[in-house]
Amino acid sequence: MNVAEAVTSRRSVRAFLDKPVGLDTIRRVLDQARMAPSGCNYQPWESITLAGAPLKALQERLLAAQPDDPLEYDFAAPSQLEKYQSRLQTLGAQMYGTMDIARGDTDMRDAFARANLLCFGAPVLLLCHFPKLMKEAQWSDVGMWLQTIMVLLRGEGLDSCPQEYMGIYGRTIKDHLGLSDDTMLFCGLSIGWRDPDAKVNNFERERVPLDDQAIFLGFD
């Protein structure tokens, strides 16, 4: 597929097929993603990618663990403003609605949230980390790298789900992988083959209209 098709067909997939992904494919994608831009060419991103028994061992530990207290970074701050909170609520209504999970069904909602720890059935999990000394500019660089990976995965016919949820268990993950406390565990990226029949992979995603986000000046 071309780049535009890869970008527009990418979505956060939350149900994967029980089908392996080869190491050669993961290595090829990550090798290509090295060309993602970064300020001053710092290339601040680092990763550990798990599959098979190592992935299962981490998942078992996460299922037995408690979230970090306090969290190492706050990913929910935008919800303090109404327009961002509204976007979150719209997504929740669409996603849980398509799975027939009622707003008051806290047990089912909690169970679905914890499915993050099992990577929604994906066979591969990339864990993104970097030194805590990195600042806002470098976090932005890491985001561009992750987006590059996700688009390249679409080019391979694969899908992914970026999971800041993994950051809630950052200290547990770092301890399990032998990473120092000077490291920021940013997120996970579950990788695999999309289940085309899963309702959660097929609800209509909403985006803000272009003219609500962009101003154009100086064009004829």
Image (cartoon, grey):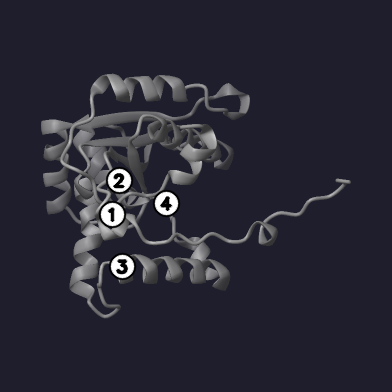
**Nearest to N terminus: mark 3 or mark 2:** 3
Q: Amino acid at mark 1?
A: Asp
* Residue 39 as seen in the image, left or right of residue 109: right
Identify the mark nearer the N-term, 1 or 3: 1
Q: Nearer the viewer, mark 1 or mark 3?
A: 3
* Along the line of sight, the residue nearer the viewer: 2 or 130: 2
Q: Is residue 178 visible?
A: no
Discs 1, 2 touching: Cβ within 8 Å: yes
Task: Determine the image quadrant of residue 91.
Answer: bottom left
Mark toward the start of the polypeptide (1 vs 4): 1
| Marking on residue 68 | 1
Give the residue type that dot 3 points to.
Thr
Write the residue at 70% across / 59% down.
211
Q: Pointer 2: what residue?
A: 170
Measured along the vertical axis of the image, is residue 100 above or below residue 166? Answer: below
The residue at which mark 4 appears reads as 73
Q: Which residue is mark 3?
A: 98
Pointer 2 or 4: first along the chain: 4
State the separation of the CA atoms marked 2 and 4. Answer: 10 Å
Q: Nearer the viewer, mark 3 or mark 2?
A: 3
Query: How far is mark 1 from mark 3, CA to CA?
Result: 30 Å
Q: Residue 166, position in %: x, y?
A: 30, 48
Mark closest to the chain's N terminus, 4 or 3: 4
* SS under mark 3: helix
Q: Secondary structure at mark 2?
A: helix
3D distance between C-alphas at marks 1 and 2: 7 Å
Q: Check the image and report above or below for 209 versus 32.
A: below
Using a 10 Å C-alpha cutoff, classify the residue at mark 3 as few (fewer than 14 neighbours), some (14 to 19) or many (20 or more): some
Three-letter amino acid code at the position of disc 4: Tyr
